[in-house]
Image (cartoon, helix red, strand yellow):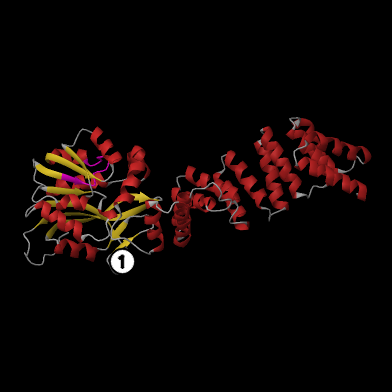
Amino acid sequence: MTGPDEFANLQQALALHGRGALEQAESAYRAILDGNPEQHEAMHCLGVLLHQKGDSRDGLALILLALRSQPSDASRHNDLGNVLAQMGDLAGASSAFRRATELGPGQVTHWNNLGSMLQKLADPHGAESAFRNALAIDPQFVPALTNLAVLLAQAGRDEESSLLHCRAFVLPPLEGKPHQMLAIAHYRLGQAEQAAQCYRAWLAEEPDNAIARHHLAASSGQDVPARASNRYLSTLFDSMAEEFDHKLVVGLSYQGPAIIGALLQQCLAPGAKLRILDGGCGTGLCAPVLAPFARRLTGVDLSEAMLGKARARAAYDELICMELTAFLQGGESAYDLIVMADTLIYFGELKPVLTAAARCLGPGGMIAFTCELAPVGAGEPGYLLKPSGRYSHDHDYLARCLDEADFQVLRSDSVVVRTEFCRPEHAVAVFAVAMAPGNGHRRSHS
């Protein structure tokens, strides 16, 4: 039985150990053991300390000796597992951690340690079970969230993995975590109001930040603009230009150019040589599929940095930095075909840009574009600004805007334009012809 003096001395030794004063703690433990060689708590802690100092063999011997006196102490088995793991005895560590979970099934760290060891021992099923047991005890235990996320990613279960990473990211401590990344993680978790709070905090620090303002509207549904502002688009895409192609094509499996290419192959006459406008051309990803049909290829975009990347492709006859609707309004019958791949996702109201496109084409001119689809029953005004910052449109609204702009739809195909958070983004690919104004009501064909 531990006397009051011995207890006080042990508490002092533990405090020194906890502060990292290893030499002083070692002397204190040894003094206790000199007075009572059977003080197994001091013996165990001295063993852990010796391991920390690099004397793992003697440390392990003390830990095992102390464990014999209290074989039902789950924390000691857990400490043993940690020491064995650091010594490279993964199987022994796994056994120690498993025993710790049997004796202390409610201890989240024991399950997490067992999961980590089973993962190293190439037992992904056992590891997953252990991590999930840890999270059943504490759903906000960040090490288990992160470990399980990594395990699932290695198994190709990317969607589950990304959710777990986001759950971990939004948990405290939040210091040093960018408002934008926190907002994106909340958005991924379906927590629109929490995302909006992050954008409000960002705006409190940077009141003129166009990205924060646009995404606050997207997350909150308040003060939603009819289209993304010029400043938002130029700021966003100037910052993304350097890594845009890799992130979009590789990271998001972007299919816009392939979709447009297939649409043109189906709808254009073989050997067609047209005056083509690539509206919202970005870095010029669509240039390779447009060039075979082009007599003259023009690109227009709001981002100078993106146009710099497009210029390097040497595929365009002309590149212009300008807002698309304003550019279209300045020309009449200037083009035979206008392509807008992943461009209308930054427009809520479509009639102004489609009306300008019809004028810029003239009767018989053609338009090809992709447009993300709003959920069924989205209601008025027929489009949504999603938390992603992109607009989606419902079928009826899109058909009405095309009709009012005097376009006749020749083809409308359901497509998957990209993945977002490992889920498909459903869209529509449209090919239409501009008709003479006042030609009456037209119905779409699919």
Where is residue 190 shown, x and y percent of the image? 45, 59
Task: Locate residue 195 relative to residue 277 in the image: left or right.
Answer: right
Q: Which residue is mark 1?
A: 376
Q: Image height check: is 332 above or below 315? A: below
Task: Locate residue 38 relative to residue 300 in the image: left or right.
Answer: right
Q: Image height check: is 24 above or below 109? A: above
Where is residue 42 shown, x and y percent of the image? 84, 42
SS category of the residue bearing label 1: loop
Given residues 112 and 226, the one toward you in this image is 226
Q: Residues within 10 Å of mark 1 (few under 14, many from 20)?
A: few
Q: Main secondary structure of the magenta part?
A: loop
Residue 190 makes an appearance in the image: no
Q: Which residues are magenta?
A: 277-286
Where is residue 422 shown, x and y percent of the image? 40, 50
Residue type beneath disc 1: Val
Residue at 25% x, 37% y is 310
Task: Locate the C terminus and report the quarter of the image it occupies.
Answer: bottom left
